[in-house]
């Protein structure tokens, strides 16, 4: 049975929603044999799918395609691993105070007369 995966693309200027590629793998094309024994393929079942779904393009493969971006790391408990990323604020207070002193210094200087 065919699988459907989504490969998200980087957003560009003017994109109202994130662009993506629709990837269909493990697809087995349907072939039919007529009463006379000749084999023929049906029309492309994916024709117009990109326009209908909003995908930039649809890629169809008979073999299995793994998209690393779609891998979800699993924790030791068997559930998806959740990561928490925190900013480094070790120098944040110093930087803010430094900027405040800089601005205060500009505000207390006399303005030269023209």
Image: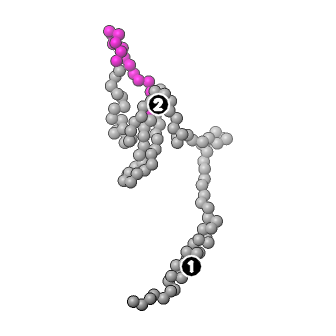
Residue extent of the magenta highlight: 24-40
Q: Quadrant of residue 41?
A: top left
| Whether residue 39 is visible | yes
Query: At 42% across and 31% down in the image, what residue appears?
Result: 60
* In front: label 1 or label 2: 1
Find out whether residue 67 is within the magenta segment: no
In the image, taking residue 84 as reference, residue 38 lies left or right, namely left
Q: Secondary structure at mark 1?
A: helix
Q: CB of mark 1 within 8 Å of CB of mark 2?
A: no
User: Residue most toward the front?
Assistant: 114
Cα distance, mark 1 to mark 2?
Answer: 60 Å
Residue indicated by mark 1: 101
Query: At 41% across and 46% down in the image, what residue appears?
Result: 19
Tell me: residue 19, above or below residue 22: below
How busy is the neighbourhood of tag 2: few (under 14 within 10 Å), some, or many (20 plus)? Answer: some
In the image, taking residue 78 as reference, residue 54 lies left or right, namely left
Residue indicated by mark 2: 25
Query: At 50% across and 83% down in the image, what residue appears?
Result: 107
Q: Position of residue 10 (x, y in %)?
A: 45, 48
């Amino acid at each position: 049975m065919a699988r459907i995966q989504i490969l998200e693309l980087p957003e560009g200027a003017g994109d109202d929603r994130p662009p993506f590629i629709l990837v269909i793998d493990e697809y087995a094309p349907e072939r039919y044999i007529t009463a006379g024994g000749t084999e023929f393929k049906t029309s492309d079942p994916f024709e117009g799918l990109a326009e209908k779904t909003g995908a930039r393009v649809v890629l169809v493969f008979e073999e299995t395609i793994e998209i690393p971006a779609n891998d979800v790391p699993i924790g030791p408990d068997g559930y998806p691993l959740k990561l928490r990323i925190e900013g480094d604020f070790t120098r944040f207070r110093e930087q803010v105070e430094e900027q405040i002193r800089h601005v205060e210094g500009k505000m207390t200087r006399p303005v030269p007369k023209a």
